[in-house]
Image (cartoon, rainbow, N blue to C red):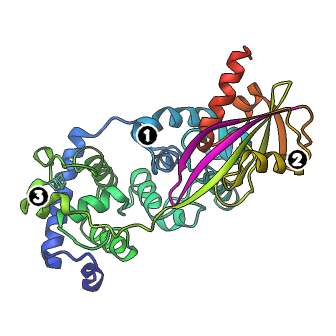
Amino acid sequence: MDQTVYQKLLSPLSLEEAEGRIRKAGAALTTWYKAAARDLPWRRTKDPYAIWVSEVMLQQTRVETVIPYYRRFLSALPDIKALAEADEMQLHKLWEGLGYYSRVRNLQRAARQIMADYGGVMPQSRDALLSLCGIGSYTAGAVASIAFGERTPAVDGNVLRVVSRLLAAEGDILSPSVRKGVEALLLSQMPDDAGSFNQAVMDLGAGVCLPNGAPECAACPVCDCCLAAQRGQQLAFPVKAPKAKRRIEERTVFLIRTAAGETLLRRRPEEGLLAGLWEFPNEEGRLGREEAAALLAGRGIRPQKLQTLGKSKHIFTHLEWQMAGYLAICGDVPLQPGEVLATDRERRQAYTIPSAFDAYKQVLDSIAKEKGI
Ligand code: SF4
């Protein structure tokens, strides 16, 4: 590999020493994987579609959480054509609770691209996979190596952590140049069985070389290749530059309910945060009672009862919503474009409301329970 690219990793090892360690670790990891691989549903198939779905679900989500979603998704949408043709509401329902809904929207966009440009057959190389919507370097590497046997790395946070410990590398693992260096190093030294190697590093990162707290070096198959362990400095790696502070946004959420037990839902815009999902109407800012009543009156809603609800908080990657809410019981509720009135049953079964609003969904569920709906 290129010396200049390698230097970005900031390892005390020379390029030749680093290559030697990665080569040795690669051989040890593939042997370990054959003996100790976790038995996961997506490892029992070579179907590239199923492997792709699993990799997308596993981004930012734990394996144990993903397994039932994966089974449900594949049984409802067993192939690329079914995904491409799926109704949006069904798609959101299948994803409800996993979060990061843009993942499933991109999954469908890519399925439509495959139908249009590849005759419904998943493209087989990393480069072709990279041309699909929502597929980045990690997913392209994972699918190309596991499903098609291409000798290519799949570098995610787990892999960056393991490599930075093996090489005691002080480069910031969040920086693109370090990621590029790790990809190049792995590509030059990884074994031919790239699918097993990539999955072995995933397993090592998930169960042995842990992200929080001390890694379990005594059980690690690559302990004798690991410079951080040899120096007793495992917790000093990986090095990450501090993230920008999360922005805090106060919001006021309205549960607007008719006497007949319907609730007003509003569809979010097609682009941006929680795109296309349903929500309870909410406004930026912490509105007092009078301001809340005035805002409702401004759009023709005059509640017979306006009750203050508890506070709730939801954390997105770069943003934190601090919410307070009101329950407004009304007679007439005039609808604006993009709004519906839904019964409790319809709300639960047909409309996907993101988990950011869980506290307020629970308020409605307890009212429904009290009334025996
Ligand atoms: Fe991680 Fe420890 Fe293994 Fe090094 S020896 S790779 S720190 S688990």
Q: Residues within 10 Å of mark 3 (few under 14, many from 20)?
A: many
Tag nearer the camera, 2 or 1? 2
Q: Is 322 one of the magenta-colored residues?
A: yes
Whole-percent x, y for residue 340 in the image: 84, 40
Alpha-carbon span between mark 3 and mark 2: 65 Å
The residue pinned by badge 1 equals 42
Q: Earlier in the sequence, mark 3 or mark 2?
A: 3
Q: Residue at x 60, y 62 (%)?
A: 133
Does any atom of ligand 1 lie closer than 8 Å to the CB of label 1?
no
Residue type for callout 2: Ala
Q: Secondary structure at mark 3?
A: helix
Quarter holding residue 272: bottom right
Name the mark on residue 235.
Answer: none
Whole-percent x, y for residue 134 in the image: 57, 60
Tag nearer the camera, 3 or 2? 2
Tell me if residue 77 can be seen.
Answer: no
Q: Residue at x 21, y 70 (%)?
A: 169
Q: Secondary structure at mark 1?
A: helix
Q: Secondary structure at mark 2?
A: helix
Q: Earlier in the sequence, mark 1 or mark 3?
A: 1
Quadrant assignment for ligand 1: bottom left
Q: Residue at x 24, y 81 (%)?
A: 7
Tell me if residue 19 can be seen.
Answer: yes
The residue pinned by badge 3 equals 229
The residue pinned by badge 2 equals 297
Contact between marks 3 and 2 (CB within 8 A): the answer is no
The boundaries of the magenta stretch are 308-330
Contact between marks 1 and 3 (CB within 8 A): the answer is no
Alpha-carbon span between mark 2 and mark 1: 53 Å
Q: Residues within 10 Å of mark 2 (few under 14, many from 20)?
A: few
